[in-house]
């Protein structure tokens, strides 16, 4: 496992806001209820890593960097993909990370949590020190400039033949298709009105998610933009292996 010489406290958050404060962070997992394909979306990450691991029978350990652990929904699938996988999981949101630690308590010996901004962690890692990078619903939150800096560092720390797999919000290249999917997603939050959870302010939760999606428009990335970025950074075999509504899973191999 890499051992970045870093304080386990947040780094520079000026380019990466904590976007899940308050009710969104407290009830983050309710998001999956309006995403009927959530399990398939997340399981695609697990299946991709499992296939990658099978191609490396000689490896005693497979080191995976996770960008953004959230509440551990992607983390657990990364770990379940192969028993040899060990994870360095980085997130700036301490409350979400604490939830992830509880979810992953039985696998604590295979995952290291770092409460810091991802760019600071990446820049402290040696070249070609990680076998794979995986992420779920995180990188779209970065500003365009910060995202590019992160991706440059990911390309540097991945080994030759290393895997990139990102399950995230990717805008359609067609603006009309993107606008349609955005409207459908925002409309889906009406489902929250059918929930009856004691102490939960449903209108506030719904309003928070709508505003979050509207804010995402400032930093959205399209499929073609991500593919071009990966090509420029020396990746090959770039594929969109899953797509439903606004979410897609993109994979690539470091040359």
Image (cartoon, helix red, strand yellow):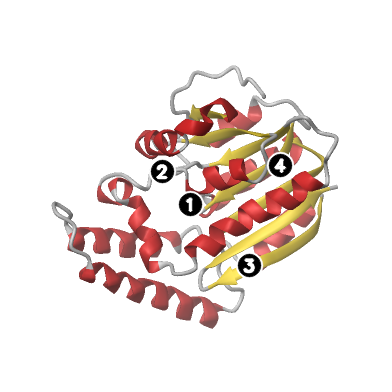
The image shows a total of numbered marks equal to 4
Instruction: Tell me which corner region of the image, top left, top right, bottom left or bottom right, holds residue 33.
Output: bottom left
Marker disc for residue 141 = 1
Q: Nearer the viewer, residue 147 or 37?
A: 37
Q: Which residue is mark 4?
A: 132
Q: Are marks 3 and 4 in contact (CB under 8 Å)?
A: no
- Find numbered disc 1 in the image and state the secondary structure of the residue it sits on: helix
Tell me where residue 228 appears, x and y as whole percent: 73, 60
Tell me the residue at 51%/69% (across/down).
Answer: 246
Ranked by sequence position, the earlier of labels 1 and 4 is: 4
Tell me the residue at 60%/66% (across/down).
Answer: 222
Alpha carbon distance from label 2 to label 1: 8 Å
- Find numbered disc 4 in the image and state the secondary structure of the residue it sits on: strand
Tell me the residue at 27%/73% (across/down).
Answer: 190
Marker disc for residue 255 = none
Ranked by sequence position, the earlier of labels 3 and 4 is: 4
Q: Which residue is mark 2?
A: 17
Instruction: Tell me which corner region of the image, top left, top right, bottom left or bottom right, holds residue 86.
Output: top right
Ranked by sequence position, the earlier of labels 2 and 1 is: 2
Q: Find the residue positioned furthest to the left.
A: 199
Q: Which residue is mark 3?
A: 242
């Amino acid at each position: 496992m890499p051992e970045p010489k870093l304080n386990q406290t947040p780094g520079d958050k000026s380019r990466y806001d904590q976007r899940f404060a308050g009710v969104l962070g407290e009830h983050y997992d309710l998001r999956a209820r309006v995403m009927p394909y959530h399990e398939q979306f997340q399981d695609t990450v697990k299946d991709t890593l499992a296939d990658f691991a099978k191609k490396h029978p000689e490896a005693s350990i497979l080191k995976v960097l996770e960008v953004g652990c959230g509440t551990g929904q992607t983390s657990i699938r990364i770990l379940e993909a192969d028993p040899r996988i060990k994870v360095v999981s980085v997130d700036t949101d301490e409350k979400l990370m604490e939830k992830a630690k509880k979810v992953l308590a039985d696998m604590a010996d295979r995952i290291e949590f770092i409460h810091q901004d991802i760019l600071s962690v990446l820049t402290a890692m040696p070249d070609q020190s990680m076998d794979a990078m995986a992420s779920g619903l995180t990188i779209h939150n970065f500003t365009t400039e910060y995202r590019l800096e992160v991706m440059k560092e990911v390309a540097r720390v991945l080994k030759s033949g290393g895997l990139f797999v990102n399950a995230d919000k990717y805008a359609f290249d067609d603006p009309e298709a993107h606008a349609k999917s955005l409207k459908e997603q925002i409309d889906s939050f009406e489902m929250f009105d059918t929930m009856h959870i004691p102490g939960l302010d449903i209108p506030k939760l719904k309003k928070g998610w709508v505003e979050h999606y509207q804010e995402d428009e400032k930093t959205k990335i399209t499929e073609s933009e991500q593919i071009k970025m990966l090509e420029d950074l020396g990746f090959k075999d770039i594929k969109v292996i899953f797509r439903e509504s606004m979410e897609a899973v993109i994979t690539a191999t470091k040359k």
